[in-house]
Amino acid sequence: MFTSRNSSTLLISLFLSAVSLSSCGSSTEQKQTDVAKIESSQKKTDQKTILFFGNSLTAAYGIDQEVGFAGLTQARIDSLGLNYRVINGGLSGETTAGGLSRLDWFLEDEPYIFILELGGNDGLRGILPAESKRNLNGIIDKVRAKYPETKIILAGMQIPPNMGQEYTEEFKSIYPEVASEKNVTLIPFLLENVGGIPELNLPDGIHPTEEGHKIVFETIWPYIESLIN
């Protein structure tokens, strides 16, 4: 039979053992948490960047960005388990000149793929196609000067014949010209099967609906997929 003193000693020993085991468990859990955080941070660091640089089309004007074509690109990448992150560099109302002036801020980190979607607002404002072409060339040159290995995709754009047929054709031609001269990948027309179709655009007739963005995404995706696989 244990004496009172022996019982107290036993209780203290058991308590200290429990504390020791608890501390050990907490230490192990903390180490596991720290490792998980480091691995998560490392994964983010290792992620390659896909940068969409454009205007309100890229910004998914009128709808949630997650269901715009840039957001849908991230969703497809995540579903495939690929280690890429998509950055939406869209700004409503942006022109090629505005894009050229704000580009540096987006080049702090190297983009693996740079998707250039600008010029639509130039066309709607009647800016000389030669000026738009010069700005597009300037954007590409600036990206390449800093990151020679970045893969560049140029999204071609077309406009309604409001400014006259001659202007419309001249504007349309700048995209294949830039793509050829700068040796970048060209999407002939970003809004293929969407532009000019009322049910696929918002009431303004310019910006795609959610359904329209799904179609635009399917137009874009094969070009991106060919560069990441």
Image (cartoon, helix red, strand yellow):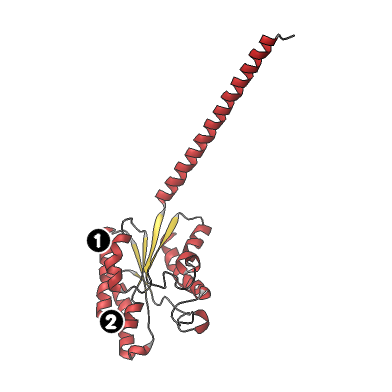
Element carrying mark 1: helix
How dense is the environment of label 2, judged by Cα within 10 Å: few (below 14), some, or many (20 and up)?
A: some
Foreground pick, 66 / 110: 66
Mark 2 or 1, closer to the camera: 2
In this figure, which residue is indicated by the disc labeled 1?
145
Foreground pick, 128 / 111: 128
Measuring from the top left, give residue 185's x and y in whole percent: 36, 69
Q: CA distance from mark 2 to mark 1?
A: 26 Å
Q: Is residue 27 above or below residue 226?
A: above
In this figure, which residue is indicated by the disc labeled 2?
127
**Residue drawn at x 32%, y 82% as measured from the top left:** 125
Foreground pick, 41 / 217: 41
Measuring from the top left, give residue 93's x and y in whole percent: 36, 74
Foreground pick, 164 / 19: 19
Q: Quadrant of residue 53?
A: bottom left
Of the numbered discs 2 and 1, the one sitting upstream in the chain is 2
Q: Count up the numbered dots.
A: 2
Q: Is residue 6 above or below residue 223?
A: above
**Residue drawn at x 28%, y 61% as measured from the top left:** 104
How dense is the environment of label 1, judged by Cα within 10 Å: few (below 14), some, or many (20 and up)?
A: few
Q: Which label was assigned to residue 100? A: none
Q: Inspect the image, locate mark 1, and give the three-letter code of the amino acid beneath it.
A: Ala
Q: Inspect the image, locate mark 2, and give the three-letter code of the amino acid beneath it.
A: Ile
**Residue drawn at x 26%, y 58% as measured from the top left:** 146
The answer to whether residue 161 is seen in the rendering is yes
User: Which residue occupies the extreme front position in the image?
Assistant: 4
**Residue drawn at x 37%, y 78% as measured from the top left:** 157
